[in-house]
């Protein structure tokens, strides 16, 4: 009889014990900030930054396969002030953790872990169907462009973005290994996509055409500066061999960077993408990082020492700082609005070409200063950059004005 009672008691305990652990008592849910760090290879690290609380509190983990639990707390492990929601106290099998109290002698209280098997890589595109009632912050290592429910977000000048409201969304970004998703075409046009691009062709000097391979295919067309015009260029998608109509025109989504203007297309059908009203496709002088059109036309070749010098200053000095990147992005938008016209006129008029050479000499001379200084901080870049800009204003505008005024006084 005692044996039967013992067996019955054991069975009862086995039934009740998991239920007890599955519903740990707590007084509140923690107030927190969730920071999600996404690495180059799709590695995800989650940090829960927990605010002070009184009494007991519950912290729910993000969905996914979790590993490498770490709690940055001096006394948490010794005093056992936390408890997982399973009888074996295994983190990987837990959905949440309950804290009996806020850890004493603690200013910063964080819980960290890695998240696996939640983000997928297909044809160079990472995709994460994320769901959370919290508003986490997302941070990325060396990713300048990400997509939040299809909306492009430019991260060139910021490390990440915050999710506002109920954060149920699809997060997408291309892998840094561009060989998985990028193809190069004529006129130095780059196309990045998560599926096959076929039948690429340049029609005349102002139209590009290519075919997509699936519905909702993500395509990024990277044009050198000066080719795509945000105001006049248009994007269409239609069936192959069918002339596009106004109904086939897509809303333009563009991101401007130092090197390119990126046109973002999400194909609504398996069809033919046509980009029209482009500028000077056949005569594009652009090179990696954008072409020095005026200097190239003046000195006759992209390999001319003066052109190479300008490119080296841009790539090796200016673009090494965030302030330099910001300046070049704004400058390119202004420069490529008129430089193709001036470059064409240089080729047609030798006298004008020589005049441009003379005009470029003070600029080249002032930029040589950057070869003799060390620029390691944003402040140094701003200081030297503003100084060179002021020097050029003096040479090109103030000095001639002084000479003209002096000549008028002599007369």
Image (cartoon, rainbow, N blue to C red):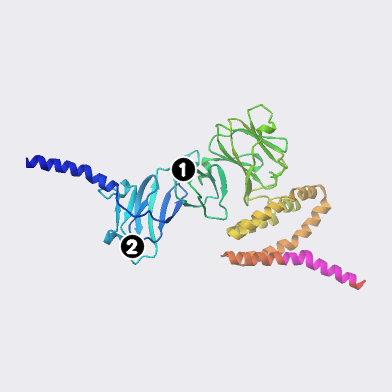
Q: Is residue 359 left or right of residue 322?
A: right
Left or right relative to 225: residue 37: left
Which marked residue is nearer to the observer: mark 1 or mark 2? 2
- The local crowd at label 1, few if under 14, some if 14 to 19, many if 20 or more residues have their Cα within 10 Å, is some
Q: Which residue is mark 2?
A: 103
8 vs 246, left or right, is left
Q: x, y (%) of residue 366?
A: 70, 65
Q: Is residue 4 magenta?
A: no
Q: Nearer the viewer, residue 408 or 263?
A: 263
The C terminus: image quadrant: bottom right
Question: Which residue is found at the position 39% from the left and 61% from the top?
Answer: 52
Residue 393 colored in magenta in the image: yes
Which label sits on residue 128?
1
Q: Is residue 374 visible?
A: no
Q: Earlier in the sequence, mark 1 or mark 2?
A: 2
**Secondary structure at numbered mark 2:** loop
In terms of secondary structure, where does tag 1 sit?
A: strand
Instruction: Tell me what residue is drawn at x 91 percent, y 73 percent.
Output: 410
Span of residues in magenta: 391-408
Q: What residue lies at 70% left-to-right and 64% top-to-bottom?
A: 389
The spot of residue 25 in percent (x, y) is: 30, 52
Q: Quadrant of residue 388?
A: bottom right
Alpha carbons under labels 1 and 2: distance apart = 34 Å
Relative to 236, does residue 325 appear above or below in the rendering?
below
Residue 397 x/y as whole percent = 78, 64
- State the predominant SS element of the stretch in magenta: helix
Considering the image in quadrants, where does the N terminus appear? top left
Vertical placement of residue 113 versus 364, above or below: above
Q: Do we see residue 407 in this rendering? A: yes
Q: Position of residue 40 (x, y in %)?
A: 47, 49
In this view, 87 is above or below 408: above
State which quadrant residue 252 falls in.
Answer: top right
């Amino acid at each position: 009889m005692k044996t039967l009672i013992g067996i019955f008691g054991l069975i009862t305990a086995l039934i009740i014990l998991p239920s007890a652990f599955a519903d740990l008592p707590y007084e509140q849910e923690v107030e927190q900030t969730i920071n999600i760090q996404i690495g180059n290879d799709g590695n995800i690290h989650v940090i829960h930054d927990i605010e002070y609380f009184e009494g007991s509190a519950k912290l729910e983990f993000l969905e996914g396969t979790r590993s490498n639990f770490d709690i940055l707390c001096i006394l948490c492990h010794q005093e056992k002030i936390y408890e997982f929601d399973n009888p074996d106290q295994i983190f990987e099998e837990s959905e949440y953790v309950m804290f009996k109290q806020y850890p004493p002698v603690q200013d910063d209280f964080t819980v960290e872990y890695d998240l696996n098997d939640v983000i997928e890589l297909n044809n160079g595109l990472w995709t994460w169907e994320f769901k959370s009632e919290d508003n986490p912050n997302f941070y990325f290592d060396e990713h300048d462009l990400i997509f939040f429910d299809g909306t492009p977000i430019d991260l060139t000048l910021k490390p990440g973005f915050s999710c506002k409201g109920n954060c149920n969304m699809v997060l997408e970004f291309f892998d840094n290994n561009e060989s998985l998703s990028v193809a190069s075409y004529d006129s130095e046009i780059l196309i990045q996509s998560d599926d096959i691009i076929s039948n690429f062709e340049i029609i005349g000097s102002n139209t590009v055409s290519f075919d997509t391979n699936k519905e909702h295919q993500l395509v990024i067309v990277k044009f050198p500066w000066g080719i795509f015009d945000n105001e006049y260029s248009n994007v269409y998608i239609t069936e192959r061999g069918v002339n596009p109509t106004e109904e086939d025109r897509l809303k333009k989504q563009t991101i401007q960077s130092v090197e390119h203007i990126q046109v973002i297309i999400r194909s609504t059908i398996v069809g033919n993408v046509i980009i029209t009203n482009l500028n000077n496709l056949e005569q594009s002088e652009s090179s990696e990082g954008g072409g020095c059109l005026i200097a190239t036309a003046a000195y006759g070749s992209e390999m001319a020492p003066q052109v190479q010098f300008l490119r080296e200053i841009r790539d090796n000095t200016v673009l090494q700082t965030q302030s330099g990147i910001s300046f070049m992005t704004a400058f390119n938008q202004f420069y490529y609005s008129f430089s193709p016209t001036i470059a064409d006129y240089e080729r047609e008029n030798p006298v004008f070409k020589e005049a441009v050479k003379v005009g470029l000499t003070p600029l080249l001379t002032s930029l040589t200063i950057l070869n003799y200084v060390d620029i390691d901080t944003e402040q140094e870049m701003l200081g030297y950059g503003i100084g060179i800009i002021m020097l050029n204003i003096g040479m090109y505008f103030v000095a001639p004005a002084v000479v003209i005024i002096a000549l008028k006084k002599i007369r």
